[in-house]
Image: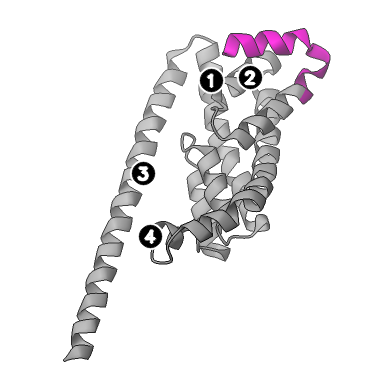
């Protein structure tokens, strides 16, 4: 895939930067294809800092447009089809400072699917301003690490591969830890609610 992208951009070199940004936007909207191959090509063709800047602009614009499209198309459907007592709906209710911190913390992890973060943010109650500010701020260090890793991989260095492996392990550990904490919190709330009901009955 990277070879195809590189060949395509080289064939349209005069407009390669614009095409790269456009491709990043399309990747964000689909939410299916990973952006890493395009980041790799950007770094290889345009250098470290130019590649970083192009990827950052493309991903932020893509996140903004995806948020608008998802909110228009899926927000009502998700809230209508999800039962009011569903745990997933509770996750969609965060807003303000809580929403900002949650989005920022997820964006800081390079290998958490960007499309999923955008989708759940869009169908939730958080504002666009909170989403885009947290996303842009979180993408800077996350994308820098990704660009740094793929840059060293493109140079044939083992350093980039080691960084990617370590970050993947950290990302998996972080996600599993958060899921465990959430389950424990829900369990404690459930027990507390049951105890209160028993108390009122007595």
**Residue tagged by mark 2?**
43
| Mark 4 crowd level (few <14, some 14–19, many ≥20, 10 Å Cα) | few
**Residue tagged by mark 3?**
174
Q: Tell me where residue 136 appears, x and y as whole percent.
A: 64, 45
Q: Which residues are magenta?
A: 1-18
**Residue tagged by mark 4?**
87
Helix, strand or loop status at disc 2:
helix
Q: Quadrant of residue 84?
A: bottom left
Q: Tell me where residue 189 appears, x and y as whole percent.
A: 29, 70
- Tag 4 near tag 2, CB within 8 Å: no
Q: Tell me where residue 103 appears, x and y as whole percent.
A: 53, 51
- Tag 3 near tag 1, CB within 8 Å: no
- Tag 1 near tag 4, CB within 8 Å: no
- Magenta span dominant secondary structure: helix
Q: Which of the two discs, 1 and 2, labels the residue nearer the N terminus? A: 2
Q: Which of the two discs, 3 and 1, labels the residue nearer the N terminus? A: 1
Q: Residue at x 48, y 46 (%)?
A: 106
As measured in the structure, the alpha-carbon distance from the residue carrying label 1 to the one carrying label 2 is 8 Å
| Mark 3 crowd level (few <14, some 14–19, many ≥20, 10 Å Cα) | some
Q: Which mark is residue 150?
A: 1
Q: Residue at x 59, y 40 (%)?
A: 139
Tell which residue pokes out farthest to the right in this image.
14
The correct choice, above or below, for 53 with respect to 7 in the image is below
Q: Front-most of 69 and 157?
A: 69
As measured in the structure, the alpha-carbon distance from the residue carrying label 1 to the one carrying label 4 is 37 Å
Q: Which of the two discs, 1 and 4, labels the residue nearer the N terminus? A: 4
């Amino acid at each position: 895939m990277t070879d195809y992208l590189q060949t395509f951009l080289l064939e349209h070199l005069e407009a390669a930067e614009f095409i790269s940004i456009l491709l990043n936007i399309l990747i964000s909207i689909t939410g299916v294809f990973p952006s890493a191959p395009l980041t790799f090509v950007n770094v290889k063709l345009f250098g470290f800092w130019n590649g970083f800047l192009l990827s950052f602009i493309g991903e932020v614009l893509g996140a903004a447009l995806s948020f608008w499209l998802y909110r228009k198309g899926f927000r009502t459907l998700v809230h209508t089809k999800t039962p009011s007592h569903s745990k997933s709906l509770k996750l969609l209710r965060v807003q303000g400072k809580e929403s900002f911190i949650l989005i920022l913390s997820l964006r800081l992890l390079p290998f958490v699917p960007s499309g999923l973060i955008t989708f759940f943010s869009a169908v939730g109650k958080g504002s666009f301003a909170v989403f885009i500010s947290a996303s842009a701020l979180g993408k800077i260090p996350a994308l820098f690490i990704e660009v740094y890793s793929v840059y060293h991989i493109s140079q044939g260095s083992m350093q980039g591969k080691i960084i990617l492996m370590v970050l993947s392990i950290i990302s998996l550990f972080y996600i599993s830890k958060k899921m465990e904490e959430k389950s424990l919190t829900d369990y404690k709330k459930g027990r507390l609610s049951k105890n209160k009901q028993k108390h009122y009955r007595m």
